[in-house]
Amino acid sequence: MHTSRNALQVRTPREVREEFARRGLSISSWARQNGYSAPLVYQVLSGKNRGMRGQSHDIAVQLGLKAGLVGSSLHPELLFPISTTAELPGNAIAGSEDSKAA
């Protein structure tokens, strides 16, 4: 599959708004079609919400304001496998040798 470079570029809020205008779409209708509240989409576009987590992150990614993955498509066990968290310092598991020594 070939992906154009433009599809991977991060856009500014102004560019996103111009694209909505070019397509004749309202931001509110896009929000409804994608299952988001219109006020939250407007907050992300205005910069009042930085789109760091949850739905605001998903909105920013879907609008092309930031690179990333939409959270609903991820599986937590792939991001944080159980075997790795046990190996991190400070993550003593009850009954393990590390927790008995502490």
Image (cartoon, helix red, strand yellow):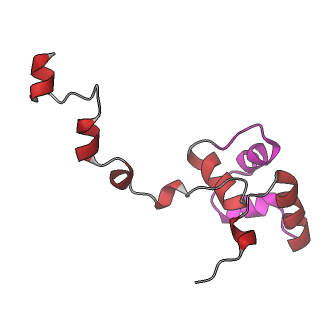
Screen quadrant of the N terminus: bottom right
Q: Inspect this view and state whether residue 36 appears.
A: no
Q: Position of residue 69 (x, y in %)?
A: 55, 58
Q: Nearer the viewer, residue 100 or 61?
A: 100
Q: Position of residue 37 (x, y in %)?
A: 69, 51
Apparent side of residue 14 relative to residue 85 in the rendered image (left or right): right
Q: Which residue is pictured at 29% across the width and 28% down the height?
A: 89
Q: Inspect this view and state whether residue 102 appears.
A: yes
Screen quadrant of the C terminus: top left
Question: How many numbered badges does the structure rendering display?
Answer: 0
The magenta segment: 24-51
Place residue 47 in its image quadrant. top right
Q: Position of residue 7 (x, y in %)?
A: 71, 70
In this rendering, the answer to whether 30 lies above or below 65 is below
Q: Which residue is pictured at 77% across the width and 37% down the height?
A: 48
Q: Is residue 45 magenta?
A: yes
Q: Nearer the viewer, residue 73 or 86?
A: 86
* Furthest-top residue in this view: 102
Q: Is residue 27 magenta?
A: yes
In this rendering, the answer to whether 2 lies above or below 44 is below
Place residue 14 in its image quadrant. bottom right
* Furthest-bottom residue in this view: 1
Q: Which residue is pictured at 61% across the width and 53% down the height?
A: 58
Place residue 9 in its image quadrant. bottom right
